[in-house]
Image (spheres, rainbow, N blue to C red):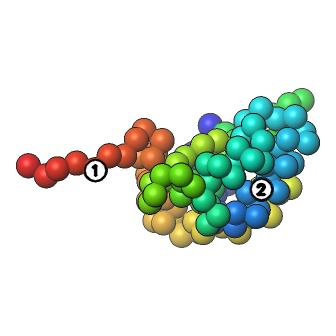
Amino acid sequence: MIHSTDPDFRVCQISFDTLLEIQLEAESRGWATRWTSIDALRRQVKEEIVVIQSLMREEWGGAIRAYRCLALFSSADSGDAGGIATIDIAPARFESLERIDRDPDVRRVLSHIFSLAVEGISMISKE
């Protein structure tokens, strides 16, 4: 697991096209942590920005083979609702993504938001 204090923890904003490239790379490498196809991704993810957070390192033979990341996105078929899913990203691609979490306070808040999203967020009525 990657913690918000680890040097390879990062939160990045990417374009929909970059997500498609990451998907194609995951398909070509035979990685299982991805959408089943580009068409499946297009059916679920709205063509808008996507926010990525590193979650885990997948190591093989002492080297990092991939970063398993959370992808937070607007759902293509759910109005204004969003979705969160995991996807593996190659180390070179991962390191090239532009970070939006350089400030430690921002990093903590973004990490908390992703934790809430993974556990489930619901609108509630105030009492």
Looking at the image, tell me whether mark 2 or mark 1 is earlier in sequence order. 2
Residue at left offset 62%, top offset 54% = 45
Residue 11 can be seen, yes or no: no
Tell me the SS state at disc 1: loop
Q: Which residue is mark 1?
A: 123
Residues packed near mark 1 inside 10 Å, few (<14), some (14 to 19) or many (20 plus): few
Check residue 74 in the rendering and tell me which mark sits there, or answer none: none
Q: How far apart, in angstroms, are the residues tagged by discs 2 and 1?
A: 31 Å
**Image quadrant where residue 13 sits:** bottom right
Residue at left offset 60%, top offset 59% = 46
Q: Is residue 45 above or below residue 62?
A: below
- Where does residue 52 sit, x and y in percent of width and height? 63, 55
Q: Which residue is mark 2?
A: 20
Indicate the amino acid at tag 2: Leu
- Where does residue 69 sit, x and y in percent of width and height? 66, 46
Kindly give the residue lying farthest to the left in the view shown: 127
Q: Nearer the viewer, residue 19 or 59?
A: 19
**Image quadrant where residue 60 sits:** top right
Residues packed near mark 2 inside 10 Å, few (<14), some (14 to 19) or many (20 plus): some
Q: Is residue 14 left or right of residue 66?
A: left
Q: Is residue 95 above or below residue 30?
A: below
- Where does residue 79 sit, x and y in percent of width and height? 46, 58
Placement of the N terminus among the 4 image quadrants: top right
- Where does residue 57 sit, x and y in percent of width and height? 72, 39
Give yes or no for contact between labels 2 and 1 (Cβ–Cβ under 8 Å): no
Residue 124 can be seen, yes or no: yes
Q: Is residue 30 left or right of residue 43?
A: right
Q: Nearer the viewer, residue 57 or 116?
A: 116
Q: Is residue 54 above or below residue 61?
A: below
Indicate the amino acid at tag 1: Met
Residue at left offset 55%, top offset 46% = 84
Tell me the SS state at disc 2: helix
